[in-house]
Every structure is written in structure tokens, then in C-alpha cells.
Amino acid sequence: MNARTTRVLQCSAALVAAGLTLTACGSGGGSSSGSSGQSQSTSFTGRGPITYVSGKDTTGVVQKVIDRWNKLHPKEKVTVIDLPTDPDSQRQQMIQNAETKSDAYTVLSLDAVWTSEFAAHQWIAKLPETQFPLDKMLTPAVDTAKYRGSLYAAPYISNGGILYYRTDLLKKAGIGEPPTTWAEMTADCAKIKKLPEGKDVSCYAGQFQKYEGLTVNFAEAVNSADGVITDADGKPDVDTAAARKGLDFLVGAFKDGTIPKEAITYQEEDSRQAFQDGKLVFLRNWPYVYALAEKSKIAGKYAVAPLPGLNGTGSSSLGGSNLALSSYAKNKATALDFMKFFTDEENATTFLKDAAFAPAYADLYDDKTLTAQYPYLPVLKQSITHAVPRPRVVQYGDVTSAIQQEAYAALTGSKSSAQALKDLQQELQKSTGQ
């Protein structure tokens, strides 16, 4: 293994749970600039079999949609390549494939925050904007698919964090509305703890293992306290009083038991299971949990609300996945047609109904039939439209690795919040060169 590959693996190994960007972790991309990527010209020619590369689909709905494509296009079949469910590992394998300029991967399902990194390194091809109905899609979702004003991915699903809460426990405690602030949430938990049903139930959890999910949860806490990680120009600005209030909330919640100690190991599925098993009053997670919780013992006993913040409603990190075309793929004409098919509104509706995937299409959130069937849609739309993107930097791998390292140090007590943020500021300045 050469030094370049070792560097890629080291950087890639430290990403997030739901995904984001880098320069120092790239190899071939180290010499490519944004401008060269922007002028890249793609010839959409060649027809035949292609591959679809994504984290393993646990819902089964993705394969059903691809089966429908394959039935309609028997000579241009799509083969699914399943990567691990962990986004850090997904990104690592996609980068390795790009580094070798392999044509094994055709269409990539990228975390929405990876677009800048993959486009800057010319690992993915620029797409023709007129081929996709971007005007019908949520603006935040479309923005995640662009780099330097050009389209490099097709919005597939959007995503926003939401607060799940136990309606039955709040009602028994005489609480009429879900909390809008962290203080209200902890006060609600104190009341529920006094109930016989609440004695063994923990208050709140998100995703705090050292992976992309920790970056997401840290960013939401900082943003919900009116802080930022990087400013609008990508300049680090995290060593502030506002950011400290956000991190202090998480640190304090672990110390006083508001967040159970075992949550330091939680990824999305761990936290979902804890909520479904009746171990949590409140849970921060993505909309996919809703449909699964309906099949659990808490069915009919929960609802959703916007995330709480320091002084009012909080801010979600913007999530989602986009489809991108590998620059080294064969049969790009087939790939483009498949991407248009896979991301159309009909399939977006299917993904919503069968897997609770957040659609990129704006009108689906206002469809009365859908909102009656999926009552979380209005809350989810609010979450997405007010979401704050994770740092949109080409050096995302280094950035998210630093965030995870310092946030984890603070949560586990090996550093104070103040020291962790000071160290994070310095690391981010090194990573971004600002």
C-alpha cells in the first residue's frame, strides 16, 4: 500500500452517519482544481449494463424500483452493488474505486454533503441540468447537488432531523405540547420520571458514536444555539460562546443523565431500537424511523416535532442522498436515463410510501392524501427548509474527522467544551487553509 492510498484510508476512516468533503484525503484530486472540474465535458454515450452503488438497502424498496427498470430495459440492466450501511465505509470504497479509475461503479448514491469533494476531484461527471425537473424540487435539496454553480448530482432523497416523542407519556404527565427548547425537554423528562411508567425510561438520545452521525448531532447542537462551524465562505468560526453553549448542552446532558451513557455508542439504528423498545422519551433521528416504529410496541404512542434548541426551535443538519455518475463509467447514456428514471416524482412517491424516504419534490409535502397518511410530512418539510448544511468544503474528510475527534473528547470528558472547540478551530483552519 503506497503513502497516497494510506492517506486516503486514514482520512476516510473518520467520517459521519448520515455524510460530507476533503482535499488532503484525495490523491488524483489533489492536483485538480474546482475550475478544471467545472470545465469538464462529459459525453453521454454508450448503452448497456450498468451498476448502482449504495449503502445496503434495508427497506427492500430500492431493489423493487430497479427490478422495474430492468424489466423495461432487459438489455440495459442495472446491477446493485451493496456497500456497508456505515457512510464512512461507503465513501471510503467509492474513493478507492475512483482512485483506480475503475469502471466497476457507474451510478453512485452519494451523501448530499459529498458533492463538492467528488466534483472537485473530477470523480463524478457534470450533469445536464435541463434533463432533471429541478424547478419542482426543494431548493435545499437542489443546492446539495451543485458545485460552483454546476449540477453534479441528481437529487434523490432529502432529509432533515426530527424529534420523536412518546405522546402517551407526555399526556400522562399532563404535558400538552412537545418541547421547543432544551430546557423544556429536560423539564418534561423530570415530570415523566415521576410516573410509574417513566421510572426506567431515559430522557433523550441522538447519534453520538464517533462517526458521521456525531458530526450531524454536534452541528445541530451548535446551530441550534445560534453558532456555526464554518461561515458562509467556509471559514472556520467554531471557537465562540454560541458554539460552546451548544456543545455544553450535549456534555451536560451526558453528565446529568438526560442522555443515557450507552448513547455514546449509538448510531441511527441503535437509537431507533432504544426508542422502539420504550427506553427513551425523546429521540432525534431521520424520518425513516416513523414507518418502522409503527410496527413496534410503541405504535400509536408517538409523534414528531421540530428539533428543540437553546431559545426556541432548533436547526437540523441537512441530510439526503443524490445520484452521481462516475467519471470512469461505461454506458453513460444508459446511466443518465436510469438516473432520470430513478429520481422522478413517481419513484419519489414510491420511496416515500414504502420506505418513508424524504422526497426531493416540494409538492409531495403538501399533498393532502399523503399528509393524512404520513402526518410527519409538514414537520419534515419545516426541518428541511430551515436546515443548515454541514460544512460545504472540498476538504470534508479532514473536517468531519476533526469534528468527530473533538466532539467525542468533550462528550467523554477527556476535554472541556472550551478546549475541544479551541482545538477544533485550529484543526479546521489547517484543513481548510483559512
Image: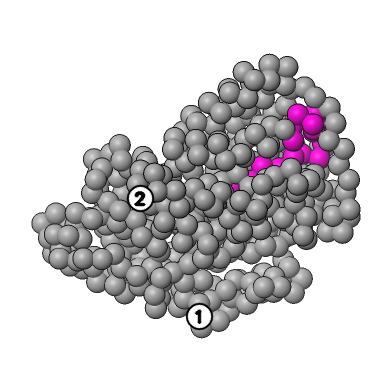
Q: Residue furthest front?
A: 368
Q: How many marks?
A: 2
Q: Is residue 6 visible?
A: no
Q: Is residue 102 left or right of residue 409?
A: right
Which disc number belongs to residue 375? 2
Asked if residue 143 lies left or right of residue 305, the reply is right
**Image quarter of the N terminus:** top right
Question: Which span is picked out in magenta?
Answer: 320-336
> Which numbered dot is residue 242?
1
Name which residue type carries label 1: Ala
* 331 is within the stretch colored magenta: yes
Residue 393 visible? The answer is yes
- Tag 2 secondary structure: loop
Q: Secondary structure at mark 1?
A: helix
Residue extending farthest bottom: 241
Q: Residue furthest left?
A: 196
Q: Which one is nearer the viewer's eye here, 254 or 61?
A: 61
Quarter location, residue 332: top right
Residue placed at 66% from the left, 69% from the top?
427
